[in-house]
Image (cartoon, rainbow, N blue to C red):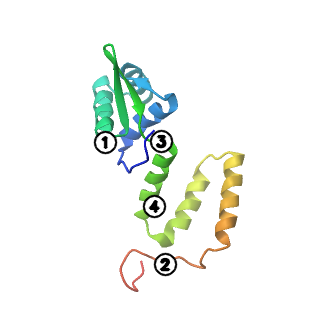
């Protein structure tokens, strides 16, 4: 796959990308069948989303006879990391810690995921500031 570039992906497009990443490649008819079952989408909706993802550079299509096969051109983990980084960039930095705590509380995590989080947090704690400043407004104003 190509070097990761920032691509804005809508919620519906994420659903299409998740299927494509999971399968590695998918035909439009396979995608239509999966999305009809998973999301209740019509074939036209799926084809529209596939077309958008090609224009955005997240997918590429190869024609095989009358059918097209779609391949991801961006990797899954860097795409997820970029989306989360973008989201957290919109939040008050003073409240990110509580947001992460709330998120971890709600998610189902494996034992390995929890061990990795604990190790990462222990490393970060060694150099973490006592508090994180609000970055919502310029100057010394706080939210």
Q: Is residue 42 above or below residue 122?
A: above
Counting residues from the N terminus, which is met first, the one under dot 1 or under dot 3?
1
Q: Which residue is mark 4?
A: 88
Cα–Cα gap, marks 4 and 1: 23 Å
Q: Position of residue 138 (x, y in %)?
A: 35, 80
Q: Residue furthest top?
A: 65
Q: Which mark is residue 75?
A: 3
Q: Residue furthest front?
A: 2
Q: Is residue 117 above or below residue 21?
A: below
49 or 100: nearer the viewer: 49
143 or 25: nearer the viewer: 25
Cα–Cα gap, marks 4 and 2: 15 Å
52 or 6: nearer the viewer: 6
Counting residues from the N terminus, which is met first, the one under dot 2 or under dot 3?
3
**Horizontally, is 24 left or right of 106 in the view?**
left
Occupied quadrant, residue 43: top left
> Which dot, 2 or 3, sits closer to the camera?
3
Callout 4 touching callout 3 (CB < 8 Å): no
Q: Residues within 10 Å of mark 3 (few under 14, many from 20)?
A: some
**Horizontally, is 32 left or right of 114 in the view?**
left
SS at badge 1: helix
123 or 100: nearer the viewer: 123
Q: Residues within 10 Å of mark 4 (few under 14, many from 20)?
A: some
Cα–Cα gap, marks 2 and 3: 33 Å
Q: Which residue is mark 1?
A: 56
Residue at point 68%, 54% (across, down) = 116
Cα–Cα gap, marks 1 and 3: 14 Å
């Amino acid at each position: 796959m190509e070097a990761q570039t920032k691509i804005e992906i809508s919620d519906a497009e994420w659903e299409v990308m998740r299927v494509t990443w999971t399968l590695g490649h998918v035909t439009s008819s396979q995608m239509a069948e999966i999305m009809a079952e998973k999301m209740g989408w019509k074939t036209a909706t799926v084809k529209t989303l596939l077309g958008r993802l090609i224009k955005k550079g997240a997918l590429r299509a190869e024609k095989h006879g009358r059918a097209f096969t779609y391949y991801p051109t961006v990797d899954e983990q860097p795409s997820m990391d970029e989306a989360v980084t973008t989201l957290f960039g919109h939040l008050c930095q003073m409240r990110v810690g509580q947001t992460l705590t709330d998120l971890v509380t709600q998610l189902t995590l494996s034992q390995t995921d929890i061990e990795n989080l604990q190790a990462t947090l222990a490393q970060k704690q060694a150099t973490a500031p006592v508090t994180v400043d609000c970055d919502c407004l310029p100057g010394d104003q706080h939210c």
